[in-house]
Amino acid sequence: MNKFDDIFMAIKNDAENQLYTQAGIDPLYFVNPAAEIIIIGQAPGKKAQASQIVWHDQSGQRLRQWLAVSDDEFYHSGKFAILPMDFYFPGKGNSGDRPPRKNFAAKWHPQLIALMPQVRLIILVGTYAQKYYLHLNSKQTLTQVVRDYAKYQPKYFPIVHPSPMNQRWLKKNPWFEMDVIPNLQKLVRNILGD
């Protein structure tokens, strides 16, 4: 077994994940030693967890559109890694899915990222990933952070979650798809084209 396999088994065997493991549910994330782009989102959705394919839902379709990459590039190029803030579907809440468990990312992300030395860009999808990785204070809104995306480069690129539930936000903030997304696509294409 390699180090990635060792970590995978450690996650499955962790006491905090035993309810999932006993139910036959594997942690859902995607890593590659040659990855150059990491996408960090919230947690797998119910459909993604059932299929065991990361971003395998409407949100994933929109995310790939925003990145201007094909399904094949996203899943098979070896250039992308997917590390949600929690590797298991957290269940449904009052308005959407429940938040990822606290301290999950702190426990597993550093070990996995250390095995991907070629990473050039980390795309932070949504509030949970942005607050954790950008060390934001509670006064900074998602809209402010995404609007100021250039401030966090070259390492990070914060974006709104591509969920259909964010349609209202997208309509209210047309600058995101007009200004931010083209810059994200250009950056991704430069990395993939190297």
Image (tube, rainbow, N blue to C red):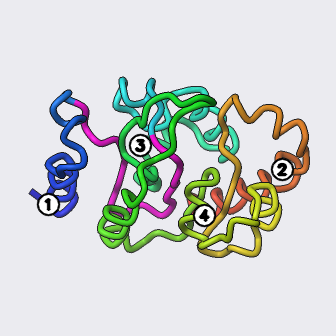
> Which residues fall within the magenta stretch?
25-43
- Amino acid residing under circle 3: His
Residue 36: give x, y in percent of width and height.
Answer: 48, 64
Residue 54: give x, y in percent of width and height.
Answer: 43, 38
Cα distance, mark 3 to mark 4? 29 Å
Dividing the picture into quadrants, the one containing residue 104 is bottom left
Question: In what element is the residue under mark 2?
Answer: helix
Q: Nearer the viewer, residue 152 or 34?
A: 152
Residue at the spot x=56%, y=58% of the render?
Answer: 129
Q: Nearer the viewer, mark 2 or mark 3?
A: 2
Cα distance, mark 4 to mark 1? 31 Å
Residue with the mark numbered 2: 176
- Amino acid residing under circle 1: Asn
Residue with the mark numbered 3: 76
- Amino acid residing under circle 4: Lys
The quarter of the picture where the C terminus appears is bottom right
Question: In what element is the residue under mark 1?
Answer: loop
Residue at the spot x=38%, y=74% of the render?
Answer: 117
Compared across the picture, whether 16 is left or right of 161 comes to left
Give the mark nearer the N terminus: 4 vs 1: 1
The quarter of the picture where the N terminus appears is bottom left
Cα distance, mark 1 to mark 3? 20 Å
Residue 141: give x, y in percent of width and height.
Answer: 76, 59
- Amino acid residing under circle 2: Phe
Residue with the mark numbered 4: 131
Residue with the mark numbered 1: 2
Give the mark nearer the N terminus: 1 vs 3: 1
The relative height of residue 188 versus residue 45 in the rendered view (above or below) is: below
Residue contact between numbered discs 1 and 3, judged by CB atoms under 8 Å:
no
